[in-house]
Amino acid sequence: MSVETNRVILAAGLQSGGSTLVSWCFLQRPNCDGVLDGDTDLIPMLRRQSSAREHWYKATISCFSLPEMIAMLEDQGYSVAPLLIARDVRHAWVSLSQKHYGRNGITAEDPPLRLRFRRFLASWQFARENSIPIIKFEAFLERPEQSLRTACEALALDWDAAMLDWPKPAADILNTRHGNATFRAADKTGLLAAIDKGKRDDTLGAVHEEDLAWLEETFSAFNEAMGYPQHLQAQSLLPGMA
């Protein structure tokens, strides 16, 4: 199936939302190349000298929302095919708050966590309103091939088993300089080997009680639409604000 040479598939998701794992799967496609994980505080950019038929750019939603990133790539002359990766926001919050780049910052380049999550919510609403394909990360872990096949169909891409088998080394990918420590330590012999089924549903750490209440109130409609529980009863809580 031929695609436009100026088309770029733009994938976006929460920080600590599993988007790097999905990104690696797409970059394993023989005719696909691009950016494994873009800079959160820089506008999305691709090297025009890439000879790939399928251009790929993945960024996490922090400083920019999905519609903002689409507009910036369109300004560069690209036809953008967007994709959103979604995860239970409470699990993402707990994971992100333990990472050095998950600081509850106060600047545009290092925004507060709630602002980052509001941008994700706005991006999800935009995706729903514009029929943009959404990968639910938990479903991807349970049924990886089905999730990837559905996304490929929505993006007008033929299925390629390389997305599961992972034959392409990092050296053959245009830009892999970013990526979280969990992914870098993962088994790269294939997608199924990289998915740690024993830990995939664990939420390590605790969340401040006010933050959990804010997440569950703010993302009530998101939780309902995506099939997430409205309340996490077993979540470890900390008193006071983060």
Image (cartoon, rainbow, N blue to C red):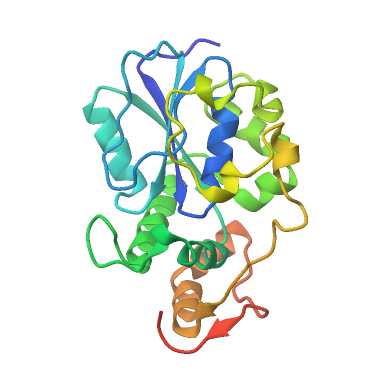
Horizontally, residue 48 falls left or right of residue 161, namely left
Q: Is residue 102 left or right of residue 159?
A: left
Q: Position of residue 114 (x, y in %)?
A: 37, 68
The answer to whether any part of residue 126 appears in the image is: no
Extreme residue toward the bottom, this view = 239
Q: Is residue 30 visible?
A: yes
Quadrant showing the N terminus = top right
Please provide percent x and percent y for residue 64. Answer: 30, 49
Residue 236, relative to residue 135: is it above or below? below
Residue drawn at (42%, 60%) of the image:
100
Left or right of 207: which side holds 198?
right
Residue at the right extreme of this rendering: 198
Above or below 95: residue 205:
below
Percent position of residue 26, x then y: 56, 29
Residue 227 x/y as whole percent? 63, 60
The residue nearer to you, when weighing 164 against 224, is: 164
Q: Quadrant of the C terminus?
A: bottom left
Q: State the residue at coordinates (44%, 77%).
A: 214
Q: Residue at x 59, y 28 (%)?
A: 152
Which residue is found at the position 23% from the left and 25% from the top? Answer: 76
How many dots with numbers?
0
